[in-house]
Amino acid sequence: MSDSLLQLIDRYRNKDRRALSRLLTLAARGEHLSEILAAASVPQSKRIPVVTLTGSAGVGKSTLTGKLIELLRRKDKRVAVLACDPQSPLSGGALLGDRFRMPTTPDEGVFIRSLSSAGGRGAIAEHLPVLLKLLAGFGFDVILLETVGAGQGDTVVRDIADVVVFLVQPETGDDLQWEKAGLLEVCDIVVIHKSDLPGAEHAEAQLRSMLELSSGPIPVILRVSSKTGSGMEELWQAIERAADSEHVRRDAGRELLRQVQEFLSARFVQLEEDAALQQLVADWKAGEVDLNDAARRLVDLLLTAGANPRSSP
Amino acid sequence: MKQHNCQNNDRLAVKMRSTNMSKRLRIVLAKVGLDGHDRGIKVVARALRDAGMEVIYAGLWQTPESVVRTVADEDADWLGLSILSGAHMTLVPRIMTLLREAGLEDVGVIVGGIIPESDYPKLKELGVARVFGPGTPMDEIVRFLRQHPRSHSSAEGAGKE
Ligand SMILES: Nc1nc2c(ncn2[C@@H]2O[C@H](COP(=O)(O)OP(=O)(O)OP(=O)(O)O)[C@@H](O)[C@H]2O)c(=O)[nH]1
Ligand SMILES: [Mg+2]
C-alpha cells in the first residue's frame, strides 16, 4: 500500500473530513477498494441507518432531503448525504444539481457528496456499499441516499438501504402510472409529496385502494409537503420505526454476501491487467468456456491471483 | 445462449473501460453575490457536462464559506465562480484565503461574469487560473480546463496538506 494511501486512511480514522472526501473519490472510481473497505470497516456501537429516497424526476427528492437534513440537525443528529444524478450516456459527464436544493450553510454535522450514476446500472452510483461504509465509519448518525430520478421499477435500492422511501406526487389527470412502479412493492414508506398541491388526498385514497389489492406487506403512506413542512415530523418517525424493524428483520447472511460481492468487485478491478484474467475473459468471449465455468474460474482467480491481495496494484 | 454470453461480455468490456476512464474532472460551479441571474452559469454547466465533466451545480447566492465547503466535500478539481454583482474584488480574495486555510490550494479557480479587464491581473495575482469574460465560447473554457489538469485527487496527491 502506498504511503499516501496509508496516511489518508490514518487521517480518515482520526476524523479528518478532507481525508473522508478523498477516500470517497477513490472509492467511487473503484480505486483501492479493498484497502478502503478494510479501513472503513470499524465496528459500530450502533446501527447507522441508510435511508433511500427514490421516485421519478422532479418529485422533490432533493428538496425533501434538504428538509430532512434540517429536521435531523434540530435533533442534533449528524447527517451524511449521497446524491446521485444521471451520467450523460453520450459524454460520460454529469450535471449534479441535487445539492443546490439542500441547506448551504457550512455545518460540521452535515456532509453532502454528489455522485454520477451511469445508465443501465440502476438508480445509484457504482461501489455504493463502500461509500456508505466510509460514511458510517466516520461517525454520522444517519445516511440519506438520493437515487436518480428514473428509478421506477428499479429495486436495487432495497438491497442497499435499511429504509426505502418512495416519493410520488399528485398527478394531473386520473391516469396514475404507479402500477408500473415495482418500488411500491419493496419500499417501507410511500410519501405523497407536494401535498400542498391539489389532488393529494385523492392520490392517497387511490394508492390505498390499489395497495389493498396487493398481497405483500403494505407500506406506510404519508402526505408530506416540503414547501409547508407538513408531515415532516411524521415522516421521520416512520423512518425510525422502519429502521428498527428492518434491523430485526434483516438477514445477516445477506449482508455478509453483499460484503463478499464488494470484495470480489474490488479484486476484479485490481486484477484488470492480470494475464490470467484477461485470458479467461478472452476465452469466454470466444465462446470456449460457458458462463458457469467462466464464473467459477473467475472466482478462483480472484481469490488466488496476485501475490498479496492487500497490496496496491 | 452464445449471444447472451457475448452481450454480457460486451458489458464487461464497457465496465473495464469505464473504470479506466473514470478520472473525470469534477468542477463546482457557484454563483456568489446577490444578483439572481443564473442563465450564464447554467449554459456553462451544460457545456462542461457535454464535454464529459462532472459538474456540481451549487447554485445561486452562495457565500465564500459555503462555496469552499462544497469544494472540500465534493473533492472537486476545479471551482468555477460566476460573479455579476461587481463584488469580485472582495469575494475572490476571501474565497482564495478560505481555500488555502482548508488545504485546498491545489484546486484550480476560474472566474466568469462581468469583470472589468483592468481587474484581470489582480485576480491572477490572487491565484485565479483564468478569467473568462462574457461571450467566451464554451470550447475555450473546455479546452482550458483540459489543458490544465489538476492532479490533487489521486491518493498520491493526497498527503501533502
Ligand atoms: N409545491 C411543491 N413543490 C415542491 C415541493 N418540493 C419540491 N417542489 C418542487 O419540485 C421541483 C423539483 O424538486 P427537486 O427536489 O429538484 O426534485 P428531485 O426529485 O430531486 O429531482 P431530480 O433530482 O431531478 O430527479 C422543484 O421545482 C421544487 O421547488 C413541495 O413540497 N411542494
Ligand atoms: Mg434531485
Image (cartoon, coloured by chain):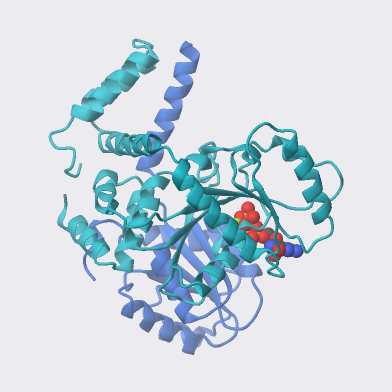
Picture quadrant of residue A174? top right
Picture quadrant of residue A269? top left
Residue A276 image offset from top left, x and y in percent: 22, 23
View extreme (right): residue = A173
- Which is nearer the eye, A268 or B160? A268
Residue B114 image offset from top left, x and y in percent: 58, 80
Q: Is residue A10 above or below residue A284?
A: below
Q: Which chain is cyan?
A: A
The residue shown at (32%, 57%) is A45
The residue shown at (60%, 85%) is B85
The residue shown at (18%, 29%) is A305
Q: Is residue A98 above or below residue B95?
A: above
Q: Which image quarter holds the C terminus of chain A?
A: top left
- Count the numbered circles shown: 0
Q: Which chain is blue?
A: B
Judge from the rendering whether residue A76 lies leftward or rightward of residue B85; answer left or right. Answer: left
Residue A184 image offset from top left, x and y in percent: 65, 40
In the rendered image, is residue A93 in sight? no
In the rendered image, is residue A118 in sight? yes
Q: Quadrant of ligand 2?
A: bottom right
Q: Is residue A14 above or below residue B93?
A: above
Residue A255 image offset from top left, x and y in percent: 38, 39
The residue shown at (70%, 60%) is A224
- Which is nearer the eye, A127 or A174? A174
Picture quadrant of residue A195? bottom right
Judge from the rendering whether residue B104 lies leftward or rightward of residue B161; answer left or right. Answer: right
